[in-house]
Image (tube, grey):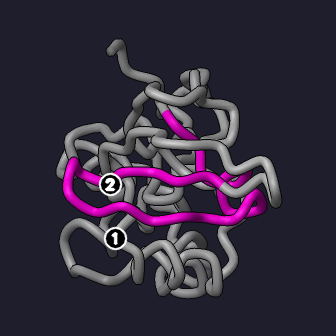
Amino acid sequence: IIRNHRLWEVFLVQKLRFNWDEVHEIAEELEHITHHQLINRLDEFLGFPAFDPHGDPIPSANGEIQPAQHVPLHDLQVNEKGLVAGVKESSNSLLQYLDKIGLKIGSACFVVEHIAFDNSVEILIEKDKKVIISREVARNVLISPQAN
């Protein structure tokens, strides 16, 4: 059921252009369609994705899960960069906030400064948008670190 749910989330985001904060409830209903041939063809149609729109791994048809090598954005040091790979908490309010500031799965981000006063983090998104995010947000955004 986890595999079905996550594949349906990918389908809804990539093919039907739902926002990542809109798909969980719809996928909850679709995940109960368990026809193996349909799910396998959906997987193939989507290009065999390894992760859902929230960055959670999608089990293969035989149940194997690819381990993720993601770290919280808050753990990156100043001048380190990475790609947004997912979120720890997928609450609608967090996902809507991330959409609002332009931080999406696959977005490149660069740590400009860790602000000692409140542990917030100043980041540069896609080389052109500076934002300061709270410690809580930075701990919930998962990053795939990139070499500098």
Q: Which residue is mark 1?
A: 102
Residue 105: quadrant of the picture: bottom left
From the top left corner, tell me how far across and down residue 14 is, in percent.
23, 66
56 shown above or below 98: above
Q: Which residue is mark 2?
A: 125
At 68% from the left and 42% from the top, the residue drawn is 74
The one nearer the camera, 114 or 110, is 114
At label 2, counting other C-alpha atoms closer than 10 Å, the crowd grade (few under 14, some 14-19, many 20 or more) is: many
Residue 118: quadrant of the picture: bottom right
- Callout 2 touching callout 1 (CB < 8 Å): yes
Q: Amino acid at mark 2?
A: Ile
At label 1, counting other C-alpha atoms closer than 10 Å, the crowd grade (few under 14, some 14-19, many 20 or more) is: some
Tag count in the figure? 2
Q: CA distance from mark 2 to mark 1?
A: 7 Å
- The span picked out in magenta is 121-143
At 41% from the left and 32% from the top, the residue drawn is 82
Horizontal side, residue 128 vs residue 61: left or right: left
At 52% from the left and 54% from the top, the residue drawn is 122
The one nearer the camera, 27 or 41, is 27
